Image: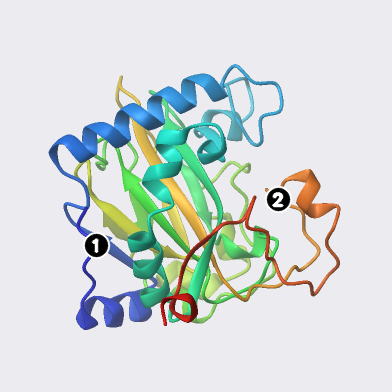
Amino acid sequence: MNTQITSDQIEFYRENGFLVIDDFLQGAELLSWQDAVDAAVAEFMKRDDMYHNQKGGDSYYGNVFIQCVNLWKMSEKVKQLILAPELGRMAADLAGTSGVRLYHDHAMFKQPWANPTNFHVDNPYDPFYSHQAIMFWVALDDATIQNGCLYFLPGTHKTSGFEVGGSLGEVGIGGLFREYPEWAEIEPYAAEMKAGDGVFISGMVAHAAGPNMTTHSRRAFAMLFMPEDATFNGKKSALPDEVYAKLKTGDMLVDDEHLPLIFSYQDSG
C-alpha cells in the first residue's frame, strides 16, 4: 500500500477538502481487496437486516448504487485490510486529529445504467459532528467520466454547516445548491481514478458521482473515520442498535467492539 503522506498533500487536502492517492493498491494487493470485497458483498446481499442496501426498483435512490455497510464485521479478510494502523495514521494526519476510529465501512457498486449520486455533504448525516470527519474511498475498478467517477466542489468544506443539505434520493443532481446557492458557481473537479487509486474526502466537502453509462459495474469501497474524541449528537445513522441504545447526547463514541480505534498518536507515544 502507498501510505506515505507529504506536507504538500496535507496542505492540498486542507485547502480543497479531498486528496487523490495514486497507486494506493497495485498488483496482488489490488486483487486481494477486490476478491475480499466481492465475497463480502455477495454474502451481505443474502441478509435481511441490510442498512441502505438498494437492489434496484422504481425509486431514484434505489438505482443510484448498491451499498453494503460494515463488511469488516462479517469478513475477516476485509477486517484485516481496513483496520491497518497505516490507514488510520494517514486519515489522522490529513484531518489534523490525534487519532481516528472506524465509524463504518461500505461498498458502493454502481450498477450498469445507474443514476448519478447527487451533490451532498456527509457529516451532517453522521452520529457525530466534526470538521475532522474523513472518508477514504478506494476505486476497485477504473472510475471514469463514463461509468460514474466522483466530483468535488473544492473548498466547500470551509463553508458547509452541520444542517442536512442535499438528498441522494431526489431527482436532480444539484438540490444542494438550494441551501448553498453560491456553490453553484464553483467549477467541479472530476476525479477520474485507476483501479487501486484512493481518495480521502472531508466529511464537510460537497461531492457527487456521475451516472454509470456502461454495461459494467463500477465498484468502490470506502471507510469512514471519526476523530477519537468524537461525541454523540443524538442521531442513530449507521450505529449498531446495541451501541445506540447505550448512548446519550454528548457521550464519547468509544466502543472498541463496534467502533474500533484504528490509530492514535496518544497510544503510539
Left/right of residue 67 with respect to residue 96 in the rendered view: right
Q: Position of residue 35 (x, y in %)?
A: 32, 27
Q: CA distance from mark 1 to mark 2?
A: 28 Å
Would you place residue 23 above or below residue 123 in this image?
A: above
Amino acid at the residue labelled 1: Thr
- Per the image, label 2 sits on a secondary structure element best described as loop
Q: What number is the disc on residue 251?
A: none
- What residue is drawn where x is 56% and y is 41%? 70
Residue 209 visible in the displayed image: no
Q: Secondary structure at mark 1?
A: loop
State the residue at coordinates (76%, 68%).
233
Q: Nearer the viewer, residue 133 or 191?
A: 133
- The reply to whether dot 1 and dot 2 touch (C-beta < 8 Å) is no
Check disc 1: other Cα within 10 Å, few if <14, some if 14-19, many if 20+.
few
The amino acid beneath tag 2 is Leu
Image coordinates for residue 234, horizontal then vertical, percent: 81, 64
Residue 7: x %, y % from top left:
23, 83
Q: Quadrant of residue 6?
A: bottom left
Position above or below: 218 against 24: above
- In the displayed structure image, the side of residue 44 where residue 217 appears, left or right: left
Q: Left or right: 195 with respect to 96?
A: left
Q: Quadrant of the C terminus?
A: bottom left
Where residue 202 appears, as percent x and y from the top left, is 45, 68
Q: Please name the residue shown 70% across and 21% down the image.
A: 48
Q: Which residue is mark 1?
A: 3
Residue 13 vertical position relative to residue 81 in the rendered view, above or below: below
Q: Which residue is mark 2?
A: 239
Q: Classify residue 111 as left or right of residue 247.
A: left
Residue drawn where x is 55% and y is 77% of the image = 131
Is residue 4 among what the camera can see? yes
Quarter location, residue 37: top left
Q: Nearer the viewer, residue 99 or 46?
A: 99
